[in-house]
Amino acid sequence: MNAPVPAATVLLVRDGPTGLQVFLIERHRDMGFAGGATAFPGGKVDAEDTSEVVRASAAGLSDLDPTQAALRVAAVREVFEESGVLLARPAGETELLSADRARRLADLHGEARRAGQVSLAELVVRERLELACELLVPFAHWITPEPLRRRFDTWFFLAPTPADQAARHDGSETVGSRWMSPREALAECEAGRRTMMFPTRLNLGKLARHERVAEALEAARRTPVVTVLPRIERREEGTRVCIPAEAGYDVVEAPVDELAR
């Protein structure tokens, strides 16, 4: 049995003119996993995410076990690499990075980070940063079912976007991006204008229950996360994918081909 790879995904949210918006990226069609899909920024946990240097330079990790700490570091790193948004503050300060400094760091280090030429620990030390991991609120936990070859153990985090930082796609792994209301994104998927994986669609539906960022964050903080390991059931009427009702989604089962959409 192939073990799932730990991964972190972030729903960056902001209050738009007509309500809550979430940042969505379009993955390059040549990507080995979910090529061409609309998704949230995220990816697998790397060895550097377990660095003691990085952990010592991050807020909100002191009460977490090493796995949960590494997931949050990975979440901050992936958001920076895929959107240019850096959830961090100058060491010793309380305010998050200004838009100008975040943009300069993205321009200066972004390509080198993606190429593996600069580690996150080097970036944190060189720029004297503290990662704002305390902003990440657990939102969902999905594990790819066992019959599938590529499996991930993915934690989804909700995070408010710093007010004056601008999110953008990297032009490499991600070739498009857009701020959208969850309902708008789901409508485009239903109309065939976007491709989304099953967990992405269900988590957008869960997020769509809230009109404002503060409301969504408060609900996430008070709602225990229930792990979703989809179960495949073969029935006379067809094969279904089933998820636990206590996970709190709008559906508990769907045709199995929903996993590949």
Image: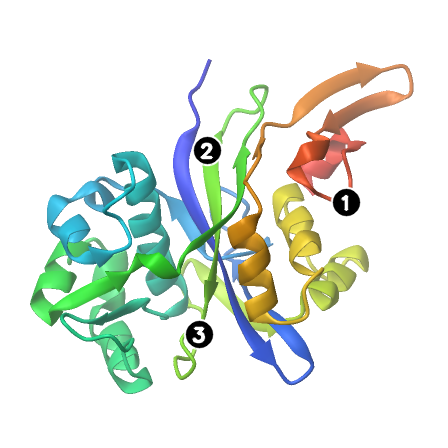
The residue at the far front in this view is: 222
The way the protein has been coloured in the rendering is rainbow
Alpha carbon separation for disc pair 1 and 2: 22 Å
Amino acid type of the residue tagged 2 in the rendering:
Asp
Relative depth, front residue between 120 and 36: 120
Q: Which mark is residue 167?
A: 3
Mark 2 sits on what residue?
A: 153
- Label 3: how many Cα within 10 Å (few below 14, some 14–19, many 20+): many
Alpha carbon separation for disc pair 3 and 1: 29 Å
Mark 1 and mark 2 residues within 8 Å of each other at the beta carbon: no
Across and down, in percent, residue 114 comes to 28, 58
Residue at 27% x, 78% y is 95
Q: Which mark is residue 39?
A: none
For mark 2, give the secondary structure: strand
Residue at 30% x, 80% y is 103
Alpha carbon separation for disc pair 3 and 2: 26 Å
Residue 252 as seen in the image, left or right of residue 139 = right
For mark 1, give the secondary structure: loop
- Label 2: how many Cα within 10 Å (few below 14, some 14–19, many 20+): some
Disc 3 or disc 1, which is closer to the eye?
Answer: 1
Q: Which mark is residue 250?
A: 1
Instruction: Look at the image and tell me whether residue 56 can be seen.
Output: yes
Across and down, in percent, residue 36 comes to 58, 54
Mark 3 and mark 1 residues within 8 Å of each other at the beta carbon: no
